Image: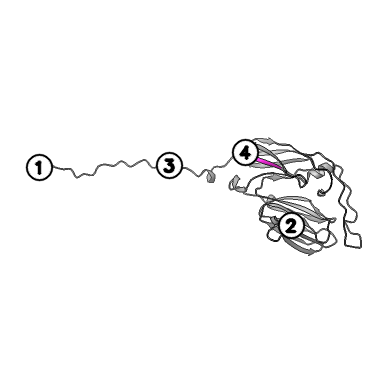
Amino acid sequence: MLAVTSTAHPVVTPAPRATAKPHVLATQRVGTGRIEGTVEISTTLTARRPQFRIYSDPGPGSTPPPPPRDPLAAEARNVVVYLDGDADQFGDLPIDAAHRHASVAQRDERFVPHVTAIARGGTVEFPNDDDVFHNVFSLSSAAGPGGFDLGRYPKGESRSRVFHRAGTVQVFCHIHQDMSAILLVLANPFFAVPDERRHYAIEDVPEGEYTLVGWHERVKPPIVRKIRVTAGQTTTVDFNIPLPQGGGGGRP
């Protein structure tokens, strides 16, 4: 008797289909918190730098404006508080227009404000509010290859510049040697300038651990604080910034 060999294929049970894991960075919203505090300046201001004029007739800047009632509060406006780190560290977050656009006026033969913070890729306008010609230029590497020069232009005109590199940009006027300003171009949008009450606030910060920087042009290196931001909470960080005695310094 012949043996019969079965040719039936064995039944194979398909393996359960793997459930796709979501892209955490792409779909999961990270909770955000808030950073706030006050900025104190621990020294008094030094005297103003002398002004050098090339015009024979007095202009708007020939008589400097009266000093502020509270010079320390005014100097606090030259402080920038920001989170250290590239934008990639914070994920794909939108940057609002307020952090991508700023204006530095030429008024009373001064740049107003003296210190301006802006996110990388932002545009700064330089309107001329004076009755004399002004010029805006910079040789800083953060301003781009060769810096920039906006040329001479009269009252009522405004020229602008886009800043693509993070860093410090020192701005001057070829016509008025005592005019200067500083642009702090930052790699992320999490920064603030103290108000008249020396208070600052940085909103909508993704939770995590960061280095918070208190920057002033005359304080090197800047003051840093290690902080943690918790979603739905406010992290309070106060800065006391001791300015070195003598010389330099921008005008508030």
Upstream in the sequence, badge 2 or badge 1?
1
Q: Which residue is mark 1?
A: 2
Q: Is residue 22 left or right of residue 86?
A: left
Which circle marks residue 209 in the picture? 4
1 vs 4, front mark = 4
Q: Amino acid at mark 3?
A: Thr
Classify mark 3: residues with Cα within 10 Å, few (<14), some (14-19) or many (20+).
Answer: few
Q: Which residue is mark 2?
A: 125
Label 3: which secondary element: loop
Q: Is residue 61 above or below residue 229?
A: below
Tag 1–tag 4 contact (CB < 8 Å):
no
Label 1: which secondary element: loop
Upstream in the sequence, badge 4 or badge 3?
3
3D distance between C-alphas at marks 1 and 3: 50 Å
Q: Amino acid at mark 1?
A: Leu
Question: Which range of residues does the magenta coloring cover?
Answer: 206-213
Q: Amino acid at mark 4?
A: Glu
Which circle marks residue 19 in the picture? 3
Upstream in the sequence, badge 2 or badge 3?
3
Q: Residue at x 43, y 42 (%)?
A: 19
4 vs 3, front mark = 4
